Structure formats: C-alpha cells, structure tokens
Image (spheres, rainbow, N blue to C red):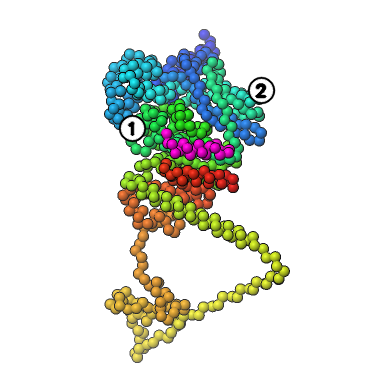
Amino acid sequence: MSRRQRLIGLAKSTRDNYIPKITGSVTSLASGASKAFTNPREVYDEDGKVILPKDTRIKLYPTYTRRLDNKYFVDVSGWMSAPGAMNRKNRVMMSVIKQLMKREDPELQDAYLPTHQVHQKESDSDNESIHSVSSNQSASSSPGSPNSDAIINERLADFFAKSIPNSEIKITIGSESKDEEEVAQKRVMTDGYGYFHITVEVSYKPSVIFASSTVTETIFAAQDIMIVPESGLGVISDIDDTVKLTGVVGDKRLLLRNLLLQDFQAWKIPSIVKWYMDLSKRRDVSFFYVSNSPWQLFPSISEYFNLAGLPKGSIHLKRYLGSMISSLLEPSSSRKKTMLHKILKDFPEKKFVCIGDSGEYDLEAYVDLAISYPNRVLAIYIRYVENSLSVEDDRRILKELLRLLAKRKTEVSLKESESIHDAQDADLIDLSDSPVPATPKKKPPMKPKKPESLHSRSISRSSDGSEPPLNKQPANEISLDAPSFQNASPPIPPSSNVSSDGNSMIDEYRPPLPPRRSRPASRNGYDYGPSSIYDSPGFLELEERDKKGAEWIQRVTTAITALRNTNTQIHIFIDTDDEFFKSTCSKLDEDVRVK
C-alpha cells in the first residue's frame, strides 16, 4: 500500500470514527438529550449528512413580519427535535421533580413512585417512550380523577426530546398573490441545540412560512404570516405573573407544581386579559410577548393563550441549554435585553408600552430600553405581585412606591406647565407703532464700604512700652470656654450689612447640626440631587429591618432618576384597580395621537 493510500485511509478512519463520536458527545451534553447519538452510524451517512432519527419534527414559533421600503422582512424561528426516551437519566429527573412537588402537596404522594421503585423499573426498558409511560401509569389512576402523571409527562415531553443539531432546513416564503411565479427560498442550519432563526427579505406580500428538511422532505412545518404595522402602538409584555399566574415569587416547589400540573384555567388573570383585549381593539396595536421561560414550555403557553383569549402576537422565549430544573427555576436576568432592543430597532416608527411584574427584574429591563431609545417608550407598567416587595409589610412598601411615583408625576406636570407658559410668553408680539425704548446700560457695582471693625488700629502699649498679652481676646470675638457664654447674647458679626440689633445674621451662630450619613451621589451611577431619600432616617431604619423593601425603594428611585430626561412614566398597579385600566386605555390613545 502506497503512502498516499495510507493517508487517505487514515483520513477516512478519522472521519468515520472519531469526529462523529466527538460531535455526538458534545451534542448530547449541549441538548440535554438523555440518550444522544453515541453511535456514529446513527449520526452521519457516507456523504456526511445527518441521519435524522425516527419521528423527527420541526416546530415553527410565532414571529412577526415587517414592511420597509416596499419590501417585507419575514422572521422565521423554530426548533428541530425528535421525541425522547424514558431512559435512566430521564426517569431519575422525573422522580426528582415529582418528589419536590409531592413535598408541597401531600395529596399527590400516592400518585408518584418512590425513588427506589423507579430504579427497579429502569431495567425493564431503557427505550420506553415518555408517552407509553404516560399511558401505562394512567391505567392505575382511579376513574374520574385527573391523571397527574400524564399531565406532567406531557408538559415535560419537550425537555426530554432529542435536539437535532447541524441539520439543514429549507425555508420557503409563500406569496399572497397567485400570480407570483417565483417565491423566496433560503437555507439555514440548526445550531448545537437544534434551534434556527433567519430573516428572509421578499419583494411581494407574503402569506405563509414553509420549513422542510433537506435530508427528508416529509419532515416539514407551516405557519401563517403575521404582518405587524410600521406605526401605531406596540405592547411589549412579559408572560409569567404578568398575563398568567405562575408563582415565580415564593416557594419554588409551588412554582414547579403550577407549571407542570396546574390546570390552565387557574393561570388566568381576568382583569389583565380584559385589559389586553381592550388595548387590542385600538387601531394599529401590536403585541410582543417576551419571557424568560424556555421554548420547551411553548406548547403549554400557546394552549393557555388560546384558552384565555389573549391577543395574538409574536412570542419570544429563551433557548433551553440542557438543565431542566435550573431552566425552570432560574430567575430572570438580562436575557430579554437582546430581543427587546431588536423589536424597537425593527419598528422605528412605533411607540411602545412595556408591561411586566414585580416578581422579577422587568422594571430594570424596561428602564434600560427607555434610556436606549428616548421618547419611544411611553410608559412602563408593573403589575404588583403579592409578597414581592417586602419581608415585613408589602402594602407599606407599595404605598411608599406609589407616593414616589406620584411625586415624580407631579414634578413632570409642573415642568410641562412651565414650558407651555414660557412658550405662550414667547409668542406674544408687540404690534404697536411706538418706538422701543433703548435699554439703559447697567451701572457699575458700588464698592462696599470697609467695616469699621476691620480698620487698622494703632496698638496701645502699656506705660512700660510693652504690648498687651496674646491671650487677651479682642472685643469682637468670643470664647467657648467663658462661663458667661450660655447667658450672654450672641455677638454682632463683623459685617457691614448687619443691623445694629444683630438679629439678621443670628443663624450664622447657631450650633452646627449633627453629622448625617453621607449621600451616595454615585449610587448605581446616578446623581439623586441634594435631598436624596437615602439620607432620610426612615430609609436607614428600613435598610436594617427590611432589606427587600429598601431594595425596592432604591430600584424605583433609581428608575425615576434614570428616566428624568425622558417622557417615560412608571406605573405600579394592582389587579383590582378598575379605574387604572380604564384611564390607561384613554391615555394611550391620546399619547399615540400626539406622538
């Protein structure tokens, strides 16, 4: 065998054995698949193409289409996966989740298997599907009772699914016109977690998105186009604890139970649903739902939206990176920032309102957005979530936050009134024929007279010619050690503009105030002015007793300060405030008209 043939054989061996194994292992860890592609023959064919597992599917997520300069830009987003197997790893994970929820609700104890029984059943079939486990366990449930295991397995199915990475998908954008001969087609590769996203530009009015696998054409998905108006009002909304009751604040076991077992009807917040429906009746109103929930919860979210009757809109969730429990329980951080900024960039003519809740950090995310795009965010609405503001007294902190926001609103109103008054004065024009008198020149300032007490005097000497002793004080100074100080009247300060009775400058000689805590002028990078709330004794006391409440006051004060040069207003509301929902709709109508 020649040297060239040996090198070719070595390259083929590396391609067929080592590269697929490494790729399969990385894919298994990244996608969270319980049994990823460990056999290289199950991953790639001889041509290097991915061999798709049985029952591979493509899911398309609700996105938006925008129009710009007689062209349409279609956002396409989705996920490629295959149903997972209920193997050992997934059984253990399922058992842990059920045990957590069982501790929260004793009534569920009989429905779940103990951990040691789960391990005994693992050896029966490592490749048993999740759906078959659901059907077997449902047989043991009593007639008429809800099948808890079936519900949990159904809602966790996408967490156990196997992502399909590095697979090519063909995107076709259909035309609304039947006369269109050619339609736009693009190709996109799934990433390491099976997700794909692409923006397709077309010159015709689109009607449908069609995504299909280039390996197997029978694997495809279709979705209708949602064209969002260029102008008007955009409503950016959170999902968890904003439009559905999730329970992010509080016991995480209860959160799991709400997500994986609770009936969708229990998620509904009637006042919020009605408010959103009232907003959707306005002209050119678009909804964008941006949440920190993983895409694996999209089936539940979509079903709830249909049940509750919430307005349709684009949905933007986060990618699932393989850790189920951390993905479900992870607090919101800055994950939303990229999507929020993209929405405002894509619709430069729109005005927006942002709606979130006090359970997470929606306030900071929306304030950052309003600062980045001045005068584009009309208002930030934060729904009050019970037990989210304080460890002692939620209502007390809520009342203080509302007072701070009302004070800010009053200051803005006064400032606007002064601006209008100044503008009216500037518009007054004198149309009379009388000549305008010349403005007299200012006279130079008068030189102040030197006080008598500061005039130089000749030093008197004693009869022996010596100077007076140094410890003898002049007549215009006092000694704090003098025994008669407390009963004596304060001396007249040596100044020419002081009256003879000495009353006009008496404040100058009052004892100094006790030292106060230094104002944190650079707290969070903002200057809070000379009368910062952080200097008040009440806040100092609150910091010691209720750090959570003090943190919320700091967060709201920081937000108010950050938005002082914008027209964005912050509102905190409760579900039972009907007047708030009514006034908000009329106020938004006015703001959008004025824009």
Residue 513 percent location from the top left of the image: 36, 65
Q: Earlier in the sequence, mark 2 or mark 1?
A: 2
How many residues crowd around disc 2 within 10 Å: few (fewer than 14), some, or many (20 or more)?
Answer: few
* In this picture, residue 338 sits left or right of residue 176: left
**Magenta segment: does it hold 272?**
yes
Circles 2 and 1: CB atoms closer than 8 Å? no
The residue at 48%/35% (across/down) is: 290
**Magenta segment: does it hold 205?**
no
Which image quarter: residue 458? Answer: bottom left
| Amino acid type at mark 1 | Arg
Q: Nearer the viewer, residue 140 or 537?
A: 140
Query: Can residue 10 be seen in the rendering of this structure?
Result: no
Residue 281 percent location from the top left of the image: 54, 37
Which image quarter: residue 283? Answer: top right
Above or below residue 332? Residue 527 is below
Residue 353 percent location from the top left of the image: 51, 42
Above or below residue 115? Residue 41 is above
Which image quarter: residue 68? Answer: top right
| Amino acid type at mark 2 | Lys
Q: Nearer the viewer, residue 46 or 257?
A: 257
